Image: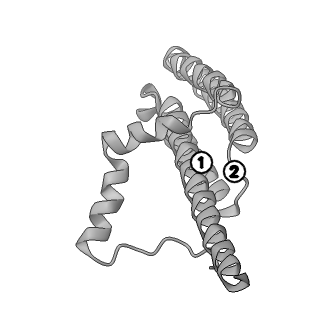
Amino acid sequence: MPNQPNPKPKSFSDLKKTLTGISPTGLASLLTYIDPFMDVLFALAFIFALLKDFSDIVISLIPYIGQILALLISAFCAIFIFLIMLIVGSRKNKALAKRFLLLLIGSLADAIPVISFFPTETAVVVIAYFMILKERREEAEERKQQAKQEQIEMQQIYAHIQ
């Protein structure tokens, strides 16, 4: 059975299933896929993003120079967070592209003077972390499905031998 991408929701039940994954209980179910050893890096990225968002508020109050410093700090923070996402997350091209796009949009939104007062970088880190947890859940479900398929095949082989 070849791996097929998830189809677009075609009916109300498919849409309901998609929205259930976004619900608080759906997000809470992702917490079972936390890997304490690998996710320490995300805790570091979260702390770094919080410090960056706090420094944006302080630095942005300085006219002209503050905006340039905030952009430079934001760029370095985005690179740091992307490297952590690269280390911790899966290396599937589609998933990597989604996380990179999320980071790019978050960094660009953070460059807008009025929005820079909001903790956008911190929100990006939290969203990216839940994206990685969702990828882990999907990989675990794929492994479970593959093991189930292999078990069925072995049972069929065993049935033919007898």
Count of marks placed on residues: 2
Which amino acid type is shown beneath numbered disc 1?
A: Arg
Q: Which residue is depicted at the point 70% across and 31% down? A: 38
Q: Is residue 40 above or below residue 14?
A: above
**Residue 127 position in % (x across, y down):** 49, 40
**Residue 95 position in % (x across, y down):** 62, 57
In this view, the residue in front, 32 or 74, is: 32
Q: Which residue is depicted at the point 46% across and 27% down? A: 119
Rendering quarter of residue 162: bottom right
Label 1 near label 2: C-beta < 8 Å?
yes
Q: Which mark is residue 36?
A: none
The colour scheme applied to this rendered structure is one colour
Which amino acid type is shown beneath numbered disc 2?
A: Ser
Seen as rendered, the residue at the extreme top is 58
Q: Is residue 31 above or below residue 89?
A: above
In this view, the residue in front, 160 or 145, is: 160
Residue picked out by circle 1: 136
Q: Is residue 32 above or below residue 95?
A: above
Seen as rendered, the residue at the extreme bottom is 160
**Alpha carbons under labels 2 and 1: distance apart:** 8 Å
Of marks 2 and 1, the one in the foreground? 1
Q: Which residue is depicted at the point 31% across and 56% down? A: 19
Residue 134 visible in the shown view:
yes
In this view, the residue in front, 54 or 58, is: 54
Residue picked out by circle 2: 90
Q: Is residue 20 above or below residue 156?
A: above
Mark 2 vs 1, N-terminal side? 2
Rendering quarter of residue 145: bottom right
Determine crowd level at label 2: few under 14, some 14-19, many 20+ residues with C-alpha closer than 10 A: some
Q: Which quadrant would the N terminus be assigned to in this image? A: bottom right
In this view, the residue in front, 78 or 28, is: 28
